[in-house]
Amino acid sequence: MQASLPVLLTLGAETPASFPIIYALGGVIAAVIIAMCVFFIVKSVRRAKAIGMEKKQIQETIKSSAIFSIVPSIPIVIGIGIMMQFLGIAIPWIRLTVIGALQYEIIAMNQAQAAMNGATGPEMIATAVVIMTLSILSGPLFNAIFYKKYQGKLADLQKKNGRLMNTVTGALLGGLLAGMLSAILVGGAFTVGKTPVPDASGAVTYGEVTLITLSASVVIMALCGVILKFGKQKWIESYALPLTILGSLVVAYFCVPLFS
Amino acid sequence: MRNIFKDTGKEAGQTREQYNASMHVIGRVFTWLSVGLIMLVSIFYCISAKQLPNWQALASSIPFLLGYVAIGLIEALSYAPLLGTSGQYMSFITGNVSNLKLPCAINAQNITKVEKGSEQQEIVTTIAIATSTIVTTVIILIGLIPLFFLQDKIVTVLNPISPYVIPAIFGGLTMVLIAQYWKIAAIPFVVCIVICVVGNFIPALAGKLTQSTMVIVGMVVSGISTTILYKTKKI
């Protein structure tokens, strides 16, 4: 991918993917997404008031979530930067604003390119957009058609046996942590000292940096815990995870050149 | 914010079930709307460029598409108890669930110390995911401007740290959750480590046991091991 970058960079602003109608559609989509979120926030805040939740809890939720989301959003912007080399700026912007997840979109785009033997141009873009759309629809369609019934069964379980439902939720969360950590740890350990292969986005993952970043994240969070508990600094609770993510990424940033 | 707090609207007179049903209606409307809009992108592009997709390439991508369909369904089923009603609709409309929306919701639940399975937890989760989505949408919009002019420089500077965002999130998140979930997570963690190690020695599995795959494997193993622990009253 890196070798073809100079040629493909010229596609960024001038590719035929950047039709005004696509930008207009992107604007409509971004407006719909923000409207949806505002709608859900208003409904939830009103409901919170109705059931007697403290205003402070809501404010804390909004503040902590806004701060938390800043750093993890940056790779999404970088994802647009990578995809725009092939698809122009409007389509990646739309895809990563609605429905598309960064890790899936880049792979789906590469699948289209691979299926066309590395071709670029309007036909590849048309094929990529269709593949990216079809590949990501099953989750939203499940929600639109079956989720209400499925959620009803979950609610019944919560009502009949709250302990069991909490155990199920705990099991899913425990599984998420176990799966993610094992992949990070073993993936990191098995690539230590090896020449890494660029991934679909062209980024290179060094095992050493993965393990250092994970360790830095654990250490920074532990330090935040110490400051919270022994330093009695309550304010740090809202900022602990964003600080941890930012701090460990700074460590990663300075470690990458050491191994590259 | 002040006005929203003053006015409880019709939510005040609703039972939890009625409120939940209204969230399903809104969630479904926005889901269909988003699906329609995202399909329009393909249609508008093909019309504007006067270019149809390459049907042969599409046909050869069917196995790939089926794999993604399966992943989407498994994720929708397994994330539902963690995201709540509104959170599930919003997360699957906007994507980036495991790397952004779910950790953000868990963080907010921990900070506000809401009870598991309670309506308060559902509300906190919804607000966290909605706020996160607004922030991401705005950052993407703002990011488009420098990207348009300095795309190659931005990608060159920041892309090298992109693979480390997930370890940066999950190291800290694990520290927060370990005290609550160590009994449940210990067995799946050991099993997942074994699967990953063994998988690295099997050529057919090399590169297939990604973070996304292992999250699903972890949830399945955790489901089985937790059921055993629950039935034997170890948790």
Image (cartoon, coloured by chain):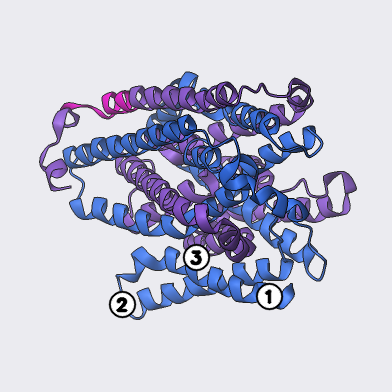
Chain colours: A blue, B purple
Q: Residue at x 58, y 63 (%)?
A: B153
- The front one of B141 and A97 is B141
Q: Is residue B201 above or below residue A105?
A: below
Q: Looking at the picture, how far across and down is residue A218, in whole percent?
A: 55, 70
Within 10 Å of disc 2 (Cα), the crowding (few <14, some 14-19, many 20+) is few
Precedes in sequence: disc 1 or disc 2: 2
Few, some or many residues within 10 Å of mark 1 (<14, 14–19, 20+): few
Q: Which residue is mark 1?
A: A257
Q: To which chain does the residue with label 3 belong?
A: A
Where A115 sits versus B21, above or below?
below
Task: Calculate the distance from the C-alpha at mark 1 to the C-alpha at mark 3.
Answer: 19 Å
Name the side, left or right, on which A16 lies relative to B195.
left
Write down the residue under mark 3.
A245
Disc 3 residue type? Ile
Badge 1 marks a residue whose secondary structure is helix
| Secondary structure type for disc 3 | helix
Which chain is mark 1 on? Answer: A
Residue indicated by mark 2 = A232
**Drawn side of residue B110 relative to residue A120, left or right:** left
Spot occupied by residue B231 in the image (x, y as percentages of width and height):
58, 40
Using the image as rendered, state which of residue A235 and residue A17 is in the foreground: A17
Can I make out residue A170 in this image?
yes
Is A208 placed above or below B105 here?
Answer: below
Residue B19 lies within the magenta run: yes
**Which residue is outermost to the bottom?**
A231
Q: Amino acid at mark 1?
A: Pro
Q: Quadrant of residue B43?
A: top right
- Which residue range is magenta in the image? B13-23
